Every structure is written in structure tokens, then in C-alpha cells.
């Protein structure tokens, strides 16, 4: 148990009785008292994800009783205005059974405070210091402070600098931690600059670089699948695996985020962080223990084994696309260049596909195909491990195709594991068809997976860094994508837009790899 865990509670007898898979499960952990400060609390992420995650922790009993929340942002609010703002957002973004009401909400609301701030003015950080001291007195938050950076990234260095100048970088009475939202830099150089700014103030064991994919249950389960079973690991290597495909596809476009996205693109927005982190989990060696650093060390090591493509090799190992107008779920949608805050001649990719090799003993010669894109036919995140074909065929009718086995780790929207294998069709002939063994988390364990941010905020409060990305892995991921970024940035793609919204993506992706799984 992390040392900050001060309490536990067990699943009710009813849970265990109604679902034997959960019977006798160890208790959840509750962190020590603390104040959490959200920088950028008037932004989109706070209202849609962070605030609902914290409130939901209150509802399910995983938030410490001695707790306070401080919003710190440019918009002008008094404490009361901000409480009302939070109430309205929770009305909008919490499910029906979690709306803010009754004594639980009243108690939560009185612990909410706000500071209208200029991020570049130390005085507002001194105000914050006073507020945190007041929280310690009023709400027993014991000098423990979690700072959550959810502003646009260019503001991160200012915040860090002023936390130090206001003397907030540590409090002798308790712990101080800083959660850093993605993107961690916009390229290798800016990531290094940001890292230098952070490490000048906070040691690595206080820095929590968030990648919300790590908080998704099926992503956490990759380690269990691989290392709590014996049957997968012996075949998890070049001898049996033909290729690994990692997909993170969305049917949504850029929504209101054109301004950010047009400077980012799919490679920076998704591949450099979420998708490469999935690759690390699926390809890493068994850690020597479940300690955060033992796991993070293996993730770093496997990323180090990936050779970034040479500039000259970028076109043969990657494909990019940009969506034009099209149809999704029967509705017409506009093209990327017509989206709000996007340049009408934008060269930004909304689809990226990359082929990488992990150059080590286990994976030599096995291609890892990564792809991510917006305005694809449906939302799906998954890892598909395709095994080699049978070595010799003697069974099945001659017209039957004998498919390779595929193990799919489904991350969203379905959460589960599916294994494709071949089976005989009942009847007098020897026909063979593909069938599936499916495990689904929801029906298997009889519980909804908690939202990713809830888990991650809880872990940061507990001082558990396992699901947060260590600096060396962030840096390595930037090193891997940098040649591709550079070549793409410097080469205008005159074929853009090159895939219709709602299609399978650009033809160039098919040229990179013919066997992408159908979306
Ligand atoms: C974010 C990206 O990190 O992840 C977004 O910035 C993307 O562009 C989102 O839409 C996808 O997250 P999820 O959890 O919906 O798969």
C-alpha cells in the first residue's frame, strides 16, 4: 500500500455475493488529507473531466474526508461564484445518479475556493499560499498539496517559477506533488526545456506526468494479462507474433479545439504519448516487481530499443492524412480545413500511421503498426496481436481461408479481450471458420470501470507514480517521432484532404500496411 494511504474500505458483501469474481477483493485506498489546486480551472478539461472525477471520488468514498479544492485561473470568480460554476458543470457532466445535491454536495461545496489570477504575478501565488494555509486550519488538509497544471502548456513554466517564488514548492508539514497535463512540450527541444524548468523546482518523485490512457482499466490490465498468466508470455515474441497493430481512432473531429490542434496534429496529439505508451506496455519485458520504478524502467528500456526512423526513411515508415468532408453515422460533416480556428490551407495531419521495430531479442523483425486519426468511422482503441499463420495446412475444405489467430485488447468503447481462432463448422464437411472467445470487463466483473482521471488523481494523492510517465520515457517518445515530425512539417502535402470523413483513412496508410483492421 502506498505510504500515503490512510484508510481502506471493502467492497460490500452484496458485491461479492452477486459477483463471485469480486468477492473478497482487497479494499480501496484513501489518500491522506490534502488540498488540490487546479491551475486553469475555468478551462474545458477541468469542467468535463477533472471536477467530475474529484466529485465522483467523493461520492464513492475514495476522497479523503479532510479535503479542499482550489481553482486558480484568469476568469473572474469569487469563491461563491466558483462553487456555483462547479455545481452547474457537475449538473451537466455527472451521470444522473451523481448530480450535486444534498449534504454530500454541501460539504464538498464549502471546501471549494478560487483565486482569480494572473499566472505571471507572484502576488497571486502568495494569495494561494495563504488560502492553502487557511485550508489546513479549516479543513485539516495537513500541509499536503497537489498542484494540477491543466492550463495551456505555454503557461506551465510561469506557474512553476511562481510556485517557487511564493515558497510553495514544499511545505515542511506535508507532501507537495505536481501533476502535469499533456502535451509535455510540443517537440523534443521544448519538452527538454519544460523538463529543466520543472526539475529546477521539483524532484522527479514529486512530478506526475499524466497520460489519461494509463488510467483506463483495460490499459492497466495489459500487465495482468501478460504477467498474471502463463499461457501468453511464451508466445509473446518474434517466434509467434506476426505483427502488432495499435489503433486509436475517433469519429469526432477537432470540435472546439482547432486552435490547439492545428499546431499539434495527430502525431503529437496521440501517437507521441498515448499510442507509444500502449506500445511500451505491450512490448516491455517483465518488471522485477510491481514498484512504480521497476515498471517504468522496463517501459523506458523498450522505448530505448526503438530506433527512430532516419529522415530519408520517413516516407516508407509513416503515412499521414487529413480529413475532407464526408459522412459519419449518416450525417454530413465538414472537412478539417473548414473547422473553426483551422487554417484554410492547413498542412496539419488528422491521421497518422507509423511502422516501428523494437530492436531487441524478443521482437526483432516484428513490425508494430500504430495509427490514430480523427473522423474515422467509429471510436475504437485497441491493441491487436496477430500471430503467425499455421506452418502446414492439411485440414479444412480447399475453399476455406485459414486465418491467423488474433488477440485483441479492447480499450474502448468495448473494454475486454477477444481471441480469434479457427473452428470446425458443425456438419459433415470439414469447413473451418473464425470464431471468438470474448471477455468483457463490464459483464465479467459486474462493475463499470472508473473513469481514467478518477484513478489517476487518486493515485497522485496516494503518491503512486506507476501510471504516470517518467521523464526518460517522455523524452524517448519525442526522440522516436521527431524525424517524422520534422519531415512532415517541412513538406507540404498537396493531396490534403486525402481521406473523406467516415472512411478508413488515407490510401497511403494502406500502402504502409495492407492488413489494417477494419474500423
Ligand atoms: C486527448 C487528445 O489526449 O485524447 C484528444 O488530445 C483526443 O484529441 C483524446 O480526442 C482521446 O481520448 P479518449 O479518452 O476519448 O480516447
Image (tube, rainbow, N blue to C red):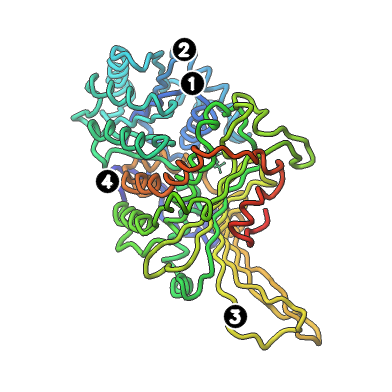
* Label 3 vs 1, first from the N-terminus: 1
* Label 2 vs 4, first from the N-terminus: 4
Q: Are the two marked residues, 1 and 2, in contact with CB atoms closer than 8 angstroms?
A: yes
The answer to which of 256 and 438 lies nearer the viewer is 256
Give the CA separation, mark 3 to mark 2.
66 Å
Q: Could you tell me which secondary element the residue under label 1 belongs to?
A: loop
Mark 2 C-beta to ligand 1 under 8 Å:
no
Image coordinates for residue 365, horizontal then vertical, percent: 46, 68
Q: Could you tell me which secondary element the residue under label 2 belongs to?
A: loop
Q: Are the two marked residues, 3 and 4, in contact with CB atoms closer than 8 angstroms?
A: no
Image coordinates for residue 192, horizontal then vertical, percent: 31, 37
How many labels, in total? 4
Question: Where is mark 1, residue-wise?
Answer: 42
The answer to which of 390 and 461 lies nearer the viewer is 390
Q: Could you tell me which secondary element the residue under label 3 belongs to?
A: loop
The disc at residue 390 is 3
The disc at residue 77 is 2
Q: Is residue 108 left or right of residue 472?
A: right
Residue 215 visible here: no
* Label 1 vs 4, first from the N-terminus: 4
Question: Where is mark 4, residue-wise?
Answer: 3
* Label 3 vs 2, first from the N-terminus: 2
Amino acid at each position: 500500500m502506498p505510504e500515503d494511504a490512510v484508510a481502506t474500505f471493502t467492497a460490500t458483501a452484496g458485491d461479492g455475493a452477486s459477483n463471485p469474481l469480486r468477492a473478497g477483493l482487497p479494499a480501496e485506498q484513501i489518500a491522506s488529507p490534502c488540498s488540490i489546486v487546479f491551475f486553469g480551472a475555468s478551462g474545458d478539461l477541468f469542467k468535463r473531466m477533472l471536477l467530475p472525477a474529484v466529485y465522483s471520488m467523493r461520492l464513492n468514498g475514495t476522497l479523503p474526508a479532510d479535503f479542499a479544492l482550489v481553482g486558480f485561473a484568469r476568469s473572474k470568480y469569487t469563491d461563491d461564484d466558483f462553487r456555483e460554476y462547479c455545481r452547474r458543470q457537475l449538473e451537466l457532466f455527472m451521470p444522473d445518479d451523481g448530480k450535486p445535491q444534498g449534504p454530500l454536495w454541501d460539504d464538498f461545496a464549502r471546501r471549494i475556493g478560487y483565486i482569480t489570477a494572473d499566472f505571471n504575478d507572484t502576488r497571486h501565488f502568495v494569495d494561494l499560499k495563504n488560502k492553502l494555509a487557511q485550508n489546513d486550519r479549516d479543513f485539516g488538509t495537513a500541509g499536503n498539496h497537489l498542484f494540477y497544471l491543466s492550463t495551456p502548456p505555454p503557461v506551465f513554466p510561469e506557474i512553476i517559477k511562481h510556485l517557487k517564488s511564493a515558497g510553495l514548492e514544499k511545505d515542511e508539514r506535508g507532501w507537495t506533488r505536481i501533476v502535469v497535463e499533456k502535451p509535455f512540450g510540443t517537440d523534443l527541444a521544448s519538452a527538454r526545456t519544460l523538463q529543466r524548468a520543472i526539475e529546477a523546482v521539483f524532484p522527479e518523485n514529486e512530478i506526475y506526468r499524466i497520460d489519461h490512457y494509463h488510467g483506463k482499466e483495460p490499459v492497466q490490465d495489459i500487465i495482468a494479462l501478460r504477467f498474471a498468466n502463463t499461457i501468453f508470455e511464451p508466445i509473446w515474441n518474434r517466434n509467434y507474433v506476426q505483427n502488432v497493430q495499435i489503433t486509436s481512432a475517433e469519429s469526432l473531429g477537432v470540435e472546439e479545439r482547432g486552435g490547439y490542434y492545428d499546431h499539434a496534429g495527430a502525431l503529437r496529439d496521440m501517437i507521441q504519448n498515448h499510442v507509444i505508451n500502449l506500445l511500451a506496455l505491450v512490448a516491455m519485458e517483465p518488471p522485477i516487481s510491481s514498484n512504480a520504478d521497476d515498471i517504468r524502467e522496463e517501459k523506458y528500456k523498450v522505448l530505448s530499443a526503438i530506433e527512430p526512423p532516419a529522415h530519408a526513411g520517413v516516407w516508407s515508415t509513416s503515412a499521414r492524412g487529413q480529413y475532407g468532408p464526408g459522412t459519419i453515422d449518416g450525417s454530413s460533416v465538414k472537412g478539417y480545413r473548414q473547422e473553426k480556428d483551422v487554417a484554410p490551407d492547413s498542412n496539419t495531419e488528422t491521421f497518422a500511421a507509423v511502422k516501428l521495430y523494437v530492436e531487441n531479442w524478443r521482437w526483432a523483425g516484428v513490425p508494430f503498426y500504430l495509427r490514430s486519426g480523427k473522423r474515422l468511422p467509429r471510436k475504437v482503441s485497441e491493441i491487436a496481436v496477430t500471430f503467425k499463420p499455421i506452418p502446414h495446412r492439411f485440414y479444412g475444405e480447399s475453399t476455406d481461408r485459414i486465418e491467423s489467430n488474433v488477440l485483441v485488447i479492447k480499450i474502448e468503447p468495448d473494454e475486454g479481450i477477444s481471441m480469434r481462432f479457427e473452428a470446425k463448422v458443425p456438419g459433415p464437411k470439414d469447413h473451418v471458420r473464425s470464431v471468438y472467445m470474448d471477455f468483457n470487463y463490464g459483464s465479467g466483473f459486474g462493475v463499470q470501470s472508473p473513469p481514467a482521471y478518477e484513478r489517476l488523481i487518486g493515485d497522485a494523492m496516494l503518491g503512486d507514480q506507476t501510471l504516470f510517465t517518467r521523464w526518460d520515457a517522455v523524452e524517448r517518445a519525442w526522440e522516436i517521432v521527431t524525424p517524422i515530425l520534422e519531415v512532415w512539417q517541412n513538406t507540404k502535402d498537396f493531396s490534403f484532404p486525402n481521406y473523406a470523413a467516415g472512411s478508413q483513412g488515407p490510401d497511403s496508410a494502406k500502402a504502409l500496411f495492407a492488413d489494417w483492421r477494419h474500423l
